[in-house]
Amino acid sequence: MSQTVLITGASRGIGAACAELAARQGWDVVVNYQHNAQAAQHVVQAVQAHGRQAWAMQADVASEPDLLRLFANIDQQCTPLRGLINNAGVVDVPCRVDEMSWPRLERMMRINVLGTMACAREALRRMSTRHGGQGGSIVNLSSAAARLGGGGQYVDYAASKGAIDTFTLGLAREVAAEGVRVNAVRPGLIDTDIHASGGLPNRVRDLAPTVPMGRAGTAHEVAQAVVWLLGNDSPYTTASLLDIGGGR
Ligand code: NAP
C-alpha cells in the first residue's frame, strides 16, 4: 500500500537526497520547503522519476499556522502519512554567546527546536495507534555539534541540536508501544549550502582535513542512514542517535 513521508526542508541538501532515496524505497514524498519553490519542484520530479507520487508544499516550520495548514493539506491530498523526516534546520553566522541577539536566538530555536517538536506532534496525531493511526517512523536531523558544542562558532545551533537528541530519546520511549519509532541522525561535516548560509562558504574545504576520514560527507551518505532508520529495515531500532561523520 502506498504511504507518504513528509520531509521538511526537502528542496535542497540532505532533505532533497532523502526524498530521492525514500522514493527509491517506495515512499510517496511531501517535499516541504520555505522559499525555493523551483528547487522543490526539481525534487518532486526526481521522486516521480522513481514512479512515486510527490507534492511540493510550502510552509515555514517555525510558524504553527503554516504547519497546521501543511498537515491539513497532507490529510486531503496524500496517501496515508507513515513517516516524518524532521530535516529543516538553519545555522547562523559565527558569533560568541556574549554577542548573540535575542532575535538570533529566537530564530534558531523556533526553526530547529519548535519546528521539529510541532511537526512530530502533528505526525503522531496521525500515525500513533493511540490516535487510531497505523504506526510510523520519525527521523530527526541532529548534528555532531550536539556533541562538540560549537564553541567559538555557533553554540546556539549546537544547543538546539542537543535539544533534538533529548527530544528523540524521550519521545521514542513515550510512543514505543504505539507503533511509532523515533530516531535521530547526527551528521558531521556535510557538503551542502548550509555553510554558505552561515557566512562560511569555504567551511567544508577548510575543515575537511580535520575529519578522521579526511573528507566531508555527502548529502546522499546521510540520506542512506536516514532512510534506513525511516523504513522497515530497522524494525527494532528506536531511541538511537546515529553518528554519520567520518569519525568526527
Ligand atoms: P541546507 O542545504 O541549508 O537546506 C536547508 C533546507 O531547509 C532547504 O530545503 C530550506 O528550504 C529548508 N528550510 C530552511 N528553513 C526552513 C523553514 N523555516 N521552514 C521550512 N524549511 C526550511 O541544509 P542541510 O545542510 O541539507 O541541512 C539539513 C539538516 O541537517 C539541518 O537540520 C542541519 O542542521 C542538519 N545538519 C547539516 C550538516 C551539514 O554539514 N550540512 C551537519 C549536521 C547537521 P528553501 O530551499 O526553501 O530555503
Image (tube, helix red, strand yellow):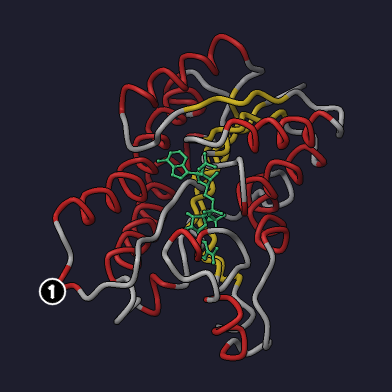
Question: Element under label 1?
Answer: helix
The image quadrant that residue 53 belongs to is: top right
Quarter of the image holding residue 222? Answer: bottom right
Residue drawn 54% across and 48% down? 139
- Which quadrant of the rendered structure holds the N terminus? top right
Q: Sort mark 1 into few (<14), some (14-19) or many (20+) by Cα contacts within 10 Å.
A: few
Residue 21, given in percent of the width and then of the height, sits at 76, 46
- Check disc 1 and give the amino acid type: Asp
Res. 57 image quadrant: top right
Residue 47 shown left or right of residue 141 in the figure: right
Question: Where does residue 178 sit, x and y in percent of width and height?
Answer: 48, 34
Q: Is residue 148 above or below residue 138?
A: below
Nearest the viewer among 57 and 233 is: 57
Q: Is residue 227 above or below residue 133?
A: below
Task: Give the residue number, with chain letter if any, for mark 1.
Answer: 98
Q: Residue at x 61, y 83 (%)?
A: 208
35 or 164: nearer the eye?
35
